[in-house]
Image (spheres, rainbow, N blue to C red):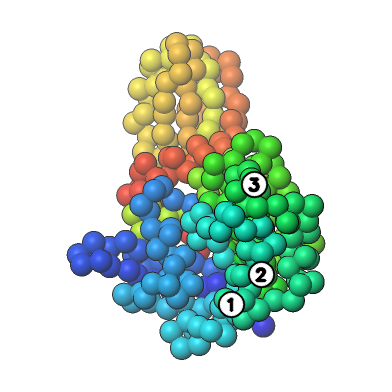
Amino acid sequence: MSDAVLETELLTKKYSRRVVVNQLSLKVERGDIFGFLGRNGAGKSTTIRMALGLVRPTSGRVRLLGHDMSKHPLRALARIGAIIEAPAFYDHFSGWRNLRMFAAMSGGAKTERIEAVLDIVGLRDRAHDPVRVYSHGMRQRLGIAQALLPAPEFVILDEPTDGLDPQGIHEMRLLIRRLRDELGLTIMLSSHLLFEVEQICNRIAIIDQGRLIYQGSIEELIAKTTTIKLTVDRIEEAYQLLSHNPKLSVSRNGDQSLYVIMADDQIPLVNALLVERGFRVMELSPQRETLEQVFLRLTQNPATTEAKN
């Protein structure tokens, strides 16, 4: 059996002459907590809608749980749970009754299942309160309960931490980990909170202007290049010397330090070059980039990046 839960192959969506998603090939593997990242307008929501059969691709293919979505969408969707944008509920009904109504519209669910998903998301004690008194975090968790009703294998969450306070974000992080670790679900989430993505996701994809610019593990992405804090005398001369090397990206920070982005194998060469030219190297220390820093660097310079599959 393939480990791929979701695969897209050269997926493309055009609206008139505007290309929203451009030959996108993604692979979400079984057991992933997969972060799907991109700026507003990058094509994330359109991609998710195509994956779920809500939007017809201009070209390309989607395979969901092994099924070709152009031929057998219902076979796949019966095993999927999803929250697309903010979940909507009937405010004057209780959380329990909202889930009962949604279950009735999608094939039904036993009372035991409704109580089980409320327990999973931590709303069992508030199940019979009207949704109008729920906090924003409780509404988000009720949305996840709705997505869990069909006992899915794969859950897609669009901005599950949007608008939450720090406590709500922490609770959502714990819940998402539980879904994977205790229930064995595969999860794909779209989020702008890159620190949270770095905390809980094992693999990510970054898209910009509809194109894939990275796919793989967070550790591999952050380790691809190293930022070195370099403190030397004659800082201006060192800056001019290193700036002429196309393999290095050099920036100034104050009067005494340079920050140089380079591959690991360039570090001893740069040190040797500076010593050879008579510079006194007082500090040469790796500075680990965060996912947010790498994301901003990649999406600000899309023409200089290459997709990694």
Q: Which of the 4 quarters of the picture holds residue 244?
A: top left
How many marks are shown on the rendered structure?
3
Q: Can residue 36 be seen in this view?
A: no
**Amino acid at pointer 2:** Arg
* Residue sitting farthest toward the bottom: 71
Circle 2 is placed at which residue position?
100
Disc 1, SS:
loop
Circle 3 is placed at which residue position?
134
Compared with 106, 205 (above or below) is above
Disc 3 vs disc 1: Cβ atoms closer than 8 Å? no
Q: Which of the 4 quarters of the picture holds residue 121?
A: bottom right
Which percent across, then down, holds residue 239? Answer: 39, 21
**Amino acid at pointer 3:** Tyr
For the residue pair 229 and 44, the one nearer the viewer reads as 44
Q: Which of marks 2 and 1 is in front?
A: 2
Disc 2, SS:
helix
Disc 3, SS:
loop
Quadrant location of the N terminus in the rendered image: bottom right
Q: In this view, does 296 lie to the left or right of 288?
A: left
Which percent across, then down, holds residue 143? Answer: 61, 58
Which percent across, then down, holds residue 100? Answer: 66, 69
For the residue pair 280 and 236, the one nearer the viewer reads as 236
Residue at (58, 30) in percent of width and height: 287
Residue at (43, 84) in percent of width and height: 70
Decide which of tag 3 and tag 1 comes sooner along the chain. 1
Circle 1 is placed at which residue position?
106
Q: Alpha carbon of mark 2 to alpha carbon of mark 3: how far? A: 17 Å
**Amino acid at pointer 1:** Ser
Disc 2 crowd rating (10 Å Cα; few below 14, some 14-19, many 20+) is: some
* Residue sitting farthest toward the front: 92
Compared with 242, 298 (above or below) is below
Residue at (48, 35) in percent of width and height: 261
